[in-house]
Image (cartoon, rainbow, N blue to C red):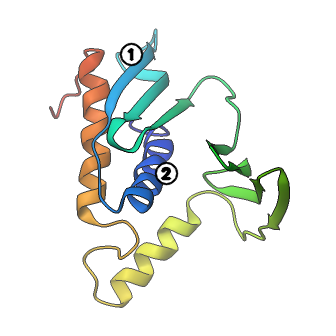
Amino acid sequence: MQDLGIYPIAWCTYLISKISGQLLFPKILSSVTKSKLAEVDETNTIILNYESERIQAVVNASMTYDTESGLRIHGTHGSIALTGHWLCNPKKIELNVGGVVSTIDLSVQGFGYIHEADHVEECLSKGLTESPLIGLEESLLNMKIMDTVRQQHGIVYPGD
């Protein structure tokens, strides 16, 4: 989870904050498969329940299995799907509102973490110590969610 798991959690935190207008800590139910080689998590599924907003998110990440790539959001009026590898090479966004589907093609250059590195460089060149896109409070909330999942499964790192 400390590697890939942060990304679907961060997507949820970001999107829920835009819907609610505030950062919210969810009720967390999780399942973790630990590696046979080391006491680390290699596959996890996490249910994030934002009761005050009546929203539930199910996220998963795995270092061992090829889980479905993409991001899907379903609501009462339709759905949003980000296809392709949502982390580093998204292909398109499909919006379905009331049965009417529209597609936004994405032309993403590069692959991997290049976009994160570019954003850090942009912030540093402007003298910023915090990203205007994902601030310190949001980063700390994401860490608290990950720490809660680790605690639920007895995963302790040497630095804890």
Instruction: Identify whether 20 is placed above or below 49.
Output: below
Residue type indicated by callout 2: Trp
Name the image quarter holding the N terminus: top left
Percent x, y of residue 54: 43, 39
User: In this rendering, would 118 be left or right of 148?
Assistant: right
Quarter-wise, where is residue 127 in the image? bottom left
Quarter-wise, where is residue 92 in the image? bottom right
* Crowding at mark 1 (Cα within 10 Å: few <14, some 14-19, many 20+): few
Name the image quarter holding the C terminus: top left
User: In this rendering, would 77 be left or right of 39?
Assistant: right
Residue 133 makes an appearance in the image: yes
Q: Nearer the viewer, residue 36 or 104?
A: 104
Percent x, y of residue 3: 44, 39
Residue 1 makes an appearance in the image: no
Percent x, y of residue 64: 60, 23
Which marked residue is nearer to the observer: mark 1 or mark 2?
Answer: 2
Residue 11: which numbered mark, if any?
2
Instruction: Identify whether 66 is placed above or below 103.
Output: above
Query: Which residue lies at the image location 72% right of the left edge and 57% below the top edge?
Result: 90
Q: What is the count of numbered marks? A: 2
Query: Which of marks 2 and 1 precedes in the sequence?
Result: 2
Instruction: Identify whether 107 is placed above or below 62.
Output: below
Residue type indicated by callout 1: Ala
Q: Residue furthest top?
A: 36
Query: Which residue lies at the image location 41% right of the left edge and 71% below the top edge?
Result: 133
Q: What element carries label 2?
A: helix
Q: Which residue lies furthest to the bottom in this view?
A: 126
Q: Are marks 1 and 2 in contact (CB under 8 Å)?
A: no
Query: Which residue lies at the image location 42% right of the left edge and 22% below the top edge?
Result: 41
Percent x, y of residue 11: 49, 51
Instruction: Determine which residue is flagged by label 1.
Output: 38
